[in-house]
Amino acid sequence: MEHLPQLISDLALILICAGIVTLIFKRLRQPLVLGYIVAGFLAGAHSPLTPSVEDVSSVQTWADIGVIFLMFTLGLEFSFKKILKMGSGPVVAACTVIFCMISLGNGVGHLFGWSATDSLFLGGMLAMSSTTIIYKAFDDLGLRQQKFAGEVLSVLILEDILGILLMVFLSAIAVSRHLEGSELVGSFLQLAFFLVLCFIVGIYLIPLFLRKMRRWLNGETLLVVAVGLCFLLVAAAVKAGYSAAFGAFVMGSILAETVEAERIGHIVSPLKDLFGAIFFVSVGMLVDPAVLAEYWLPICVLTLVILAGQAVFGTGSFLISGQPLKVAMQCGFSLAQIGEFAFIIASLGLSLGVTSHFLYPVVVAVSIITTFLTPYMIRAAGPAYALVERVMPAGVRQRLDDRGTARHRPAARSPWQQLLRALGGQLLAYGVLSVAAVGLSLGTLLPTFRGLLGHWPGNAVCGLLTLLVLAPFLRAIVMRKNHSREWATLYSRGPGNRALLRATFAGRYVLAAAFVYYVINYLSPFFWPYHVAASLLIVGAMVASRRIKYVSIKMERTFLQNLRSREIKARRESRTGPEYAGRLLRHDVHLAQLEVPDNSRWGGQSLRQLDFSRQESVMIAAIVRGTHRINIPDGEAVIFPGDKLEAIGDDNGIRRLAERMGAEVYALAPDDADHHLQLRRLIVGTESPFCGVTLGASGIRDRFHCMAVGFEAEENVIDVADSRRTILRGDALWVVGEEAALRELAAANRGAQAGAAPQAGER
């Protein structure tokens, strides 16, 4: 008899248990994450009444893969460009609330006498609100179209990326056990170097590869390629000293800038759901009732700390970011829970062996409690604001409330600011590429060439290839922006500006020469002054070369095209919102997009008939229909099911419009056998009212809502029905219809409704 590996038996137990429990939680309208945790407890060793998983180590490996897929799909939903477009408000709010909650959690851990590492990891867990839980709560409460929900989701996106950086920071502390100021700066510089290098190289190469291979990229091959790229960067990140989750997130964020991002997200979603479920089940397996009973006091205290801390510090963070008091309180109260990211940080601490085993089940228990309380905390923001409104001085409250209605126009940058900002970005990008090229060449290629050609010939060949690779990067460092509009404007403003411009050019020239000098000095046996002179001459030749100029410009244009490819495609398909949407979000009036249901009663009605402006005080700015966009539609514009309406209004108006959209629908027919089409054979008898009547005049279609397929011939062949053919006695007529209609038609054929049967010639 074939032996079944224990892992397969364990997976059967895990998935069956998870399936049953999550169906129950789905029916109870509770987050599925909690169902997975409960299933994990039932399948774990701490549940004496149910079978237990035996090969825990193998299940943990699958759980680690689940973390990789969770972070990969999170990266697919992330965009560095979106962060830049958000402005400073969400960044300030996210950084402030994370710092405050880390400090608060760290302090609570020390009060309980826990170790410094336990306290620091605890602070990191308490700082990370759950994107999944909050998103579902907004959906369940019908709040996702309100202004504050958009602010919360923006901060959650930033929290996710800051959480990745936090994991890297915690890993560095866990490994070294201490981290001084210089080491901290060095760690973050290395992290920035790795991140920028991966992003630049990935954005340049991966979209090119996907475009070249597009004709062969069906669902199966795209899945294999995307997962392969994910695990490639996972391996590279681990090799560089970072976590696997960090590498998966970075690759996801790179693929998020490609035109295939949505397809990849769709095909990877089942893998994420499967392995993510195993991860959350593995979290539940660590829940020990004995530990929970022993640490009941910390669980209660931490729950109160999260609820009160997010209510106070979260509200304060959004106030600092420029939100009015009411919106700030709604946002702060919405963040009062922890979820999947806290589990990932907790599993990181366990895998590194730096946190105590009791911390994981304690955090899981706190997460379960705060998740159940999330809808109540969101609802409590309104009464809490009303209470604050009563006790706060009217002048202070008015100033805080007026912040959301004030217009904030960013100050125009001077030409120097614009030029230095552009030069700084280019120096960072090309500098990172140059450092990576030099390091790869001297660290990997040089030993190979020396082994093949000998020491000095190998040095010469390696040096020549290195300089050829560096040439486009170094030329861009020296020459980019020297003929820009900002440069010309400043050059025309007098000798002082000209001197400063020449100084920036000289500084960049020296920086490029320094890279060349390092390569030559590393490989050449000659005296260093010759190396300096050669470096200056080589950079001059690079600047003068038209071939290198062409390659440099082409590389930059390709990178920018790849970076903007998704936006270009969205603009071509008219899926981008109007330019004024971002400005509206800074006021009480904002823009929201709602999709008309397929069974909506609005289908075929005009905007004038629906009268949104008078009934809901909402204006329709645009109608998006497939790839077609109707901007500023007039009153005669007609709505169809599946349309996306871009509506402008305040929170109350958008909410009323969403409620009306959900209410004015046709009732869906139940999915039962009576409403399925069936094929039946109908014998026309002597008493049948259809006898002697043409098929078109019989009323089979109009009166009985059935369709005649054809007449059965003697050779058991069905002749296609013709509306002009007369139905004769004994004909075998094949008809299609729903069960109830077919029964009514059969009764009429038997003569039960002969008096109501149509006469010949009636239509």
Image: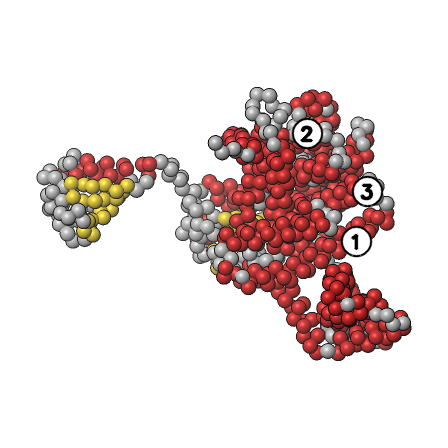
- What number is the disc on residue 189? 1
Q: Which numbered disc, 1 or 3, marks the residue closer to the eye?
A: 3
Residue occupied by mark 3: 176
Residue found at x 67% / y 54%: 80
Question: Neighbour class for label 1 at 10 Å: few (<14), some, many (≥20)?
Answer: few
* Sequence-first tag of 1 and 2: 1
Q: Position of residue 163 (x, y in %)?
A: 71, 44
Q: Is residue 612 above or below residue 743?
A: below
Residue 542 seen in the figure? yes
Give the quadrant of residue 142.
top right
Q: Which residue is mark 2?
A: 361
Residue type highlighted by circle 2: Pro
Considering only vertical position in the picture, is 705 above or below 107?
A: below
Mark positioned earlier in the residue sequence (1 or 3) = 3
Q: Secondary structure at mark 2?
A: helix
Q: Residue 590 or 501: which is nearer the viewer?
A: 501
Asked whether 248 or 131 is in front, the reply is 248
State the SS at label 1.
Answer: helix
Tell me how far mark 1 sits from mark 3, CA to CA: 17 Å
Q: Quadrant of residue 358?
A: top right
Instruction: Provide residue 164's location: percent of width, then percent of height.
Output: 70, 46
Position of 719 relative to 564 (above/below): above
Distance from Cα at disc 2 to Cα at disc 3:
26 Å
